[in-house]
Structure formats: structure tokens, C-alpha cells
Image (cartoon, grey):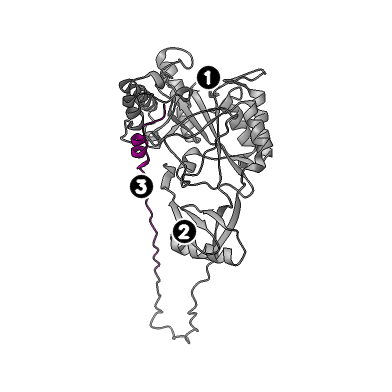
């Protein structure tokens, strides 16, 4: 059953943005000569301001609306063949290589949802996610503190070390109450898992909610929905505190992936899901579905008219999905870039000034029409006008 319209309307009403501009101040000192020293002839004064090197910013330009596939992996295995929920490590490495050669780059889910849809010139975005975390075949750490190469994230991390321009960004949707992790006593297992979680957060493999026990929310009442989400969030914070890393808790976000893509069917359970508030007081920011590539549905930018944070699409990352992205890459726009300037660094903080610069660049045929994305702003730009359509929230919060 689809979510109640009132629930979705209430869910969509949330986003606050801020902007600041720095100031600078300089000081000048003088030196007096001793009285016994003859006064020299005054030197000609140089009244010209010190020469400043020209300052430019590079904007990502989308000539048509961008879209990002969110590929969702599950568990990993040693040998072929790969299946729905078990991808062989050899297949996974080949998938990464094929995406890389086809011009895709990994982008951060949080940055995309915040409006930062920048990618390098000529590249296309892809977002990596993983469900049912944490299994040991997904990630374990070596004695040196790196992901083991016989795990899924270990393969991805090793690929990133060899191809840093590809990027390493993951969205990990965890069930922290349905399986053990590691070896030894329960406390020892919790410490091993907590250290893995710390590594992930510190390396932009961010952890979100997939319910505590991977329950079917379609058949769960409102109290059950709230309990499953709350238990999972509380366990995540407990683990971070266990290894004295509560300082990472502010980096957590309130985003939920529906187990099996099954949304609640009853009004009270829908209300519980769309109104869920995490232990830190954050309202739910995004809810993710999942489907196969046979019904391809890519993530739109947050300024798009049909962008719905209550129902964001993901794709099961099987071999068929990767083949589809590679074979159909030209159907999806690649980014272009435009160098804007010269301007001062302070001028780059003001959207009205940037808008005038962008308009000049388009009218002089130096840059194309389209959507322009800088570090702080998103503009819709034509040869007649440039409009600010979104401010990008600091810190990447959606």
C-alpha cells in the first residue's frame, strides 16, 4: 500500500540552510629613524594595491538533468557464480573495473541529497550502498587496521587505492540485532564490530538504519516500527561509546532502507515510519526502496520536481545491473565543467555575484546552458537569466 498523502506532505516539509561570508582585516606598521641619523630623501610611494593572483572556481555543469544509480550489494562470497544476495569477489572487482572504464565515479549519498551533485568533467555518478550490514564477508579489519581484501569493502578499498579518482563512498544500511559478529565473548564481538564501525565512518562508509532485526515492515504495527528503528539506533550509539568514540555520533544521520523494499501497510505504522525521530532528535531524512534493473529507476537531484525523499529508488547490484549501466552509459548525461572568474574569494560566497558571472560566460559562449553546481549553490542557467535553485547545506546534511 502506498503511503498516506498527508504523511508524505508532512515528511517533505524539512530543510534549513545557512550561509556566511568571511571578513578580512590587515594591519600596517611604520618605523622611525634615530634622531642622529640624517634624514634620507623620501622614496617614491607605491600607491598601487598588492597584486593578487586571479581567483577562479570550477562549476559542474549539467546540460540535462543528472541521475545517479544507487547500487545495493548484500553479501560476498569467494567463488563464482554470483547470485542475488551473494556476489563473488572476482565478479565485484570486475564490476568496479567496468564502471571505472565506462566513466562512472563514486559519489557520496549524503552530499547528493544535500544538493552537491558535482562530479569531474566527463564523468557520471554512481552511488554504492550495502544492506544487512554487518557480516564478516562485508568487512573485517586486518591487524594493520585496513579492510581485509577477502571482504567486499576490502575489495572496494583496494580498488580505490589503485584508482583514487574513482572515489570511495558507501551507504551502509545496518541490522545490528540479528546476527553475531567476530569471535570470542559477546563483549569481544561488540568491540570488534565497534572498531569496524569506527573505520567505516572515518572513511566515508556511513551507517544508516535497516531495522534492528531486518523485519518485514509491511506486517509490523506502529509500535513495532518505532521499536525496530530505535533499538538499531541505540545499539549503534552504544557500540561507538564502547570504544570511546562517541565523538562520531554527531556524524550519524536518520535515514532508513526498507527491508525487502516493503513499506508499512497500516496508518499507524506509516505514521511511525515517516514520523520517526532518532535518539539525537533528528527527524527521518530519507527512506529508500529497492528494485531490480528490469525496472530501472535512478536517484534524481533534490531540486527535481519528482524528487521524493519518502521513496528513493535503489537497484539490486547484480551482474545484470552493472552490464546495464555499462551498455547504456550514453543514455545518461555526463558532467561538464566551467571555470568562473576572475573574482575574489569573498565574491565566490555570494550567489548574486556568481549568477552574473555565469550569465556572462554563457552569453560569451564560453560555457553551456544548464544546471551549474558550485561548492555552495545550485543555479539554473540559460542565455537569458540565471536563477538560484538551491543552497547546499554545509556538512552534507540532506
- Residue located 44% across and 60% down the image: 351
Could you tell me which secondary element the residue under label 1 belongs to? loop
Tag nearer the camera, 3 or 1 = 3
Query: Mark 3 — residue?
Result: 16
Tag nearer the camera, 1 or 2 = 2
Which is nearer the eye, 353 or 185? Answer: 353
Residue 25: within the magenta? Answer: yes
Q: Are marks 1 and 2 in contact (CB under 8 Å)?
A: no
Q: Which secondary structure is most common in the magenta stretch? A: loop
- In this rendering, position of residue 51 left or right of residue 235: right
The magenta stretch is 1-27
Measure the C-alpha gap from mark 1 to mark 2. Answer: 48 Å
Q: Could you say which disc has been placed on residue 136 in the image?
A: 1
- Image position, residue 125 (x, y; %): 58, 41
| Quarter of the image that includes the N terminus | top left
Q: Can the viewer see residue 344 in this picture? A: no
Could you tell me which secondary element the residue under label 2 belongs to? strand
Could you tell me which secondary element the residue under label 3 belongs to? loop
Measure the C-alpha gap from mark 2 to mark 3. Answer: 19 Å
Amino acid at each position: 500500500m502506498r503511503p498516506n498523502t498527508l504523511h508524505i506532505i508532512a515528511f517533505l516539509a524539512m530543510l534549513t540552510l545557512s550561509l556566511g561570508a568571511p571578513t578580512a582585516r590587515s594591519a600596517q606598521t611604520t618605523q622611525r629613524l634615530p634622531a642622529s641619523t640624517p634624514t634620507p630623501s623620501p622614496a617614491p610611494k607605491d600607491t598601487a594595491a598588492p597584486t593578487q593572483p586571479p581567483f577562479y572556481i570550477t562549476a559542474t555543469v549539467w546540460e540535462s538533468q543528472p541521475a545517479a544509480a544507487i547500487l545495493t550489494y548484500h553479501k560476498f562470497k569467494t567463488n563464482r557464480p554470483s547470485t542475488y544476495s551473494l556476489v563473488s569477489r572476482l565478479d565485484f572487482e570486475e564490476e568496479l573495473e567496468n564502471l571505472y572504464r565506462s566513466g562512472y565515479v563514486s559519489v557520496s549519498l549524503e552530499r547528493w541529497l544535500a544538493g552537491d551533485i558535482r562530479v569531474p568533467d566527463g564523468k557520471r555518478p554512481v552511488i554504492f550502498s550495502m544492506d544487512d550490514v554487518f557480516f564478516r564477508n562485508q568487512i573485517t579489519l586486518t591487524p594493520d587496521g585496513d579492510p581485509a581484501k577477502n571482504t567486499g569493502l576490502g575489495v572496494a578499498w583496494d580498488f580505490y587505492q589503485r584508482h583514487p579518482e574513482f572515489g570511495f563512498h558507501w551507504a551502509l544500511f545496518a541490522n545490528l540485532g540479528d546476527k553475531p559478529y567476530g569471535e570470542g565473548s559477546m563483549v569481544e564481538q561488540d568491540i570488534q564490530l565497534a572498531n569496524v564501525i569506527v573505520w567505516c565512518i572515518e572513511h566515508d562508509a556511513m551507517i544508516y538504519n535497516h531495522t534492528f532485526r531486518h523485519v518485514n515492515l509491511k506486517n509490523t504495527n506502529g509500535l513495532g516500527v518505532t521499536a525496530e528503528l530505535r533499538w538499531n539506533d541505540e545499539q549503534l550509539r552504544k557500540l561507538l561509546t564502547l570504544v570511546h568514540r562517541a565523538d562520531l555520533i554527531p556524524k550519524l544521520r536518520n535515514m532508513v532502507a526498507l527491508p525487502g523494499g516493503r513499506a508499512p501497510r497500516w496508518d499507524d505504522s506509516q505514521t511511525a515510519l515517516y514520523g520517526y525521530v532518532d535518539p539525537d532528535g533528528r527527524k527521518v531524512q530519507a527512506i529508500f526502496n529497492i528494485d531490480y534493473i528490469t525496472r530501472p529507476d535512478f536517484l534524481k537531484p533534490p531540486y527535481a520536481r519528482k524528487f521524493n525523499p519518502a521513496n528513493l529508488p535503489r537497484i539490486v547490484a547484480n551482474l545484470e545491473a552493472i552490464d546495464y549501466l555499462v551498455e547504456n552509459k550514453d543514455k545518461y548525461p555526463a558532467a561538464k565543467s566551467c571555470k568562473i572568474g576572475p573574482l575574489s574569494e569573498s565574491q565566490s560566497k555570494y550567489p548574486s555575484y556568481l549568477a552574473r558571472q555565469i550569465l556572462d560566460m554563457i552569453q560569451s559562449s564560453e560555457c553551456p546552458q544548464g544546471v551549474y553546481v558550485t561548492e555552495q549553490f545550485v543555479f539554473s542557467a540559460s542565455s537569458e537569466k540565471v536563477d538560484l535553485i538551491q543552497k547546499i547545506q554545509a556538512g552534507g546534511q540532506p
